[in-house]
Amino acid sequence: METAFPWLTILTLLPLVAALPIPLLPDQDGKTVRWYALGVGLVEFALLAWTCLTQYDGHESGFQLVESYPWIPQIGLNWSLGMDGISMPLVMLTGLVTTLAIAAAWNVTKRPRLFFFLILAMYSAQVGVFLAKDLLLFFFMWELELVPVYLLIAIWGGAKRRYAATKFILYTALGSLFILVAALAMAFYGNHYTFDMDELAMKNFPLALELLLYAGFAIAFAVKLPVFPFHTWLPDAHGESPTPVSMLLAGILLKMAGYGLIRMNIEMLPNAHIYFAPILAILGVVNIVYGALNAFAQRNLKRRIAYSSISHMGFVLLGIAAFTDLGISGAVLQMVSHGLIAAAMFFLVGVTYDRTHTLAMDDMGGLAQQMPRTFALFVAASMASLALPGMSGFVGELTVFLGFSSSDVYSPAFRATVTVLAAAGVVLSAVYLLSMLREIFYGAQSEKLAGVEWSDLKPRELVISLCLLAPIVAIGVYPKLATQAYDTKVVEVATRVRNNFPVVARTQNSRFYAAVLNAPKLADATATGAAAEVAID
């Protein structure tokens, strides 16, 4: 569905265009630029919310509000934007978390003009990634987002900021090359040269080429998600990032990879997905358990939460690998849920650091008496992270579990093994989160904090925390607030993949696939998928 008014172009370019006058603002102490950036963020979020809630129709599965203009026709690049059920909730998440991250940066006094310029530039790039309908434009926005993150860590980060920033840019930039190569290969294949995602999804690639394309995209997104063993940049980046950047890293940037896996790997390359899905499921379990064990071993508060993010993003992989609409729905819900929870956790870690000036858990203790409101909200965010019923983390992980365990594509033994190991990761998350709360807030206060002038959450910090926790509880109590935006789209994606199940017959020569996949159920699954597609039509 196309629109006569360029809503999506305005949403994508507004933060970047509004950032351009920042160097010219008359400002001595950074106060003016802070209010200006926050005003831009609020206007952008208001426009995003209005567009998503009034112009978007959740009953349609295709791209809506489509805009397409020639940009650089010599290389086939079009300014082509669209919104569907996968991108809409992530665009809303981007607007909320980025606006709150701007508010969280209120105390930044070092080069505030440059800081808020970079934040707003990154705002545009993030929105552009989720709205791009042209694959080359997607790559352009993906790369544009890297530069602000690198500079924000390298200039405003901690003692090892240059090391962390360099590691981030090397990992993610090298991974991005795989997106470019795969995009060019898809565009040039066949008689029709195009980067349009709808047209690329209709191309019939040879299986060997499709497997290579899938592997290229998967490597790039595995770095960003991040997936073991490409994960090591994330704890370093989080450990050295200022609080607003950590909120954006965990809340939005990781979700770009999950979005890419659904958009490119499942929707455009469904035949290859049948081969790679069991591998994604295994990597998802590794992420869940490995991330949880590493989180438990961390004594740095930010690094513990960073490894927690690695663990929780494993559920996204598991949902993507499920082949069911419930599993993919769980993956999207987990991305939204984790984006809110991780942003809240890192913000509250930043609040704690502002008072104690340390991230070492060994130097903390007894903070509950000194900071009761911070303690209460930290506990609430931790309960959401460990999947307490009534919180969004619970419904996200439960949906993934149900989606994967009910998938008749996999053998019962494989499903049982994966489910049990993932459940063990959930138990481990409760262990490392509860032990973290005990060490920070209970017990005797460390002697190293004897000279601290204590203060609890200020009104601005309380508002930011509540703005993140409110949707966490709302989605936990009534998940349909989020799922109604993408249910139709998820059913379409899952149906298309399941209708490609006959290709599995060619994998039965492999002992691995013969053991993992439930071959007798494939014919029934295909018939079910076809019936679902008819129902949608």
Image: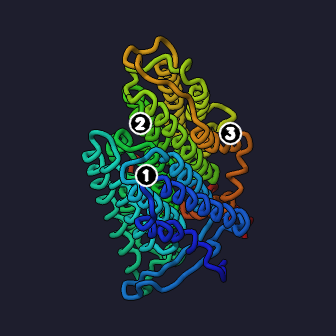
Q: Secondary structure at mark 2?
A: helix
Q: Residues within 10 Å of mark 1 (few under 14, many from 20)?
A: few
What is the spatial separation of the Cα atoms under label 2 and label 1, in whole angstroms?
Answer: 36 Å
Q: Quadrant of residue 484?
A: bottom right
Find residue 29 and name its label.
1
Q: Earlier in the sequence, mark 1 or mark 3?
A: 1
Kind of residue at badge 1? Asp
Kind of residue at badge 2? Tyr
Residue 138 appears in the picture as rendered = yes
Task: Tell which of 224 and 366 is nearer to you.
Answer: 366
Residue under the point 49% across and 77% down: 196
Task: Tell which of 241 and 104 is nearer to you.
Answer: 104
Residue 520 appears in the picture as rendered = no
Q: Earlier in the sequence, mark 2 or mark 1?
A: 1
Q: Residues within 10 Å of mark 3 (few under 14, many from 20)?
A: many
The quadrant of the picture occupied by the C terminus is: bottom right
Q: Is residue 308 above or below residue 179?
A: above
Specify whether 7 is left or right of 179: right
What is the spatial separation of the Cα atoms under label 1 and label 3, in whole angstroms?
Answer: 38 Å
The quadrant of the picture occupied by the N terminus is: bottom right
Find residue 433 and name its label.
none
- Residue 31: x and y in percent read 49, 52
Tell me the residue that label 3 is attached to. Answer: 473
Residue under the point 32% across and 45% down: 233
Q: Is residue 413 above or below residue 269?
A: above
Furthest toward the top, the residue is 444
Find residue 307 and name its label.
2
Task: Tell which of 303 and 450 is nearer to you.
Answer: 450
